[in-house]
Image (spheres, rainbow, N blue to C red):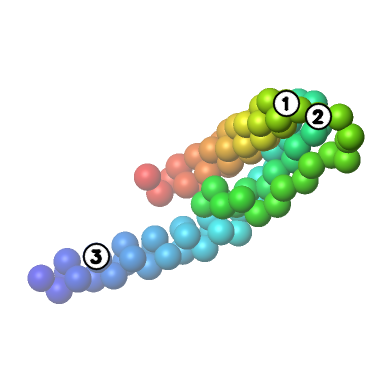
């Protein structure tokens, strides 16, 4: 029984360390048109948003730009996380 508790403690400790590493990771994504740039951390929290200073844009273009920036950041983050944690899974 104590072995199970020790295993549980070790799993919690490992999960806590992984969460710290995820929080520290930062990835940038930018839309193809350069209108939107975002930064997310390893937990997919949105940390920064930058919008280009351009007078003429429409809502559809802005929405697509956010989607592109997020998709690029998420894709880059996924590659980093696979490399970083592949030995743990």
Cα distance in 3D space between marks 3 and 1: 51 Å
Residue farthest along the left direction in this orientation: 1
**Residue ID for mark 2:** 57
Q: State yes or no: discs 1 and 2 in contact (Cβ < 8 Å).
A: yes
Residue drawn at x 46%, y 58% is 18
Residue drawn at x 72%, y 26% is 61
> Relative to 88, is 77 on the left or the right?
right
- Secondary structure of the residue carrying tag 1 is helix
Image coordinates for residue 83, horizontal then vertical, percent:
53, 41
Along the line of sight, which residue is nearer the eye, 63 or 24? 63
* Residue 12 found in image quarter: bottom left
Image coordinates for residue 52, horizontal then vertical, percent:
84, 39
Image coordinates for residue 22, horizontal then vertical, percent:
53, 55
Front tag of 3 and 1: 1
Q: Callout 1 environment at 10 Å: few (<14), some (14 to 19), or many (20+)?
A: few
Query: Measured along the vertical axis of the image, is residue 79 above or below residue 32?
Result: below
């Amino acid at each position: 029984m104590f072995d199970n508790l020790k295993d549980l403690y070790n799993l919690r400790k490992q999960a806590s360390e992984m969460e710290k590493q995820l929080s520290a990771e930062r990835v940038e994504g930018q839309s193809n048109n350069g209108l939107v740039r975002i930064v997310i951390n390893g937990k997919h929290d949105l940390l920064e948003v930058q919008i280009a200073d351009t007078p003429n844009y429409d809502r559809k273009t802005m929405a697509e730009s956010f989607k592109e920036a997020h998709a690029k950041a998420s894709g880059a983050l996924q590659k980093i996380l696979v490399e970083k944690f592949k030995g743990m899974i």
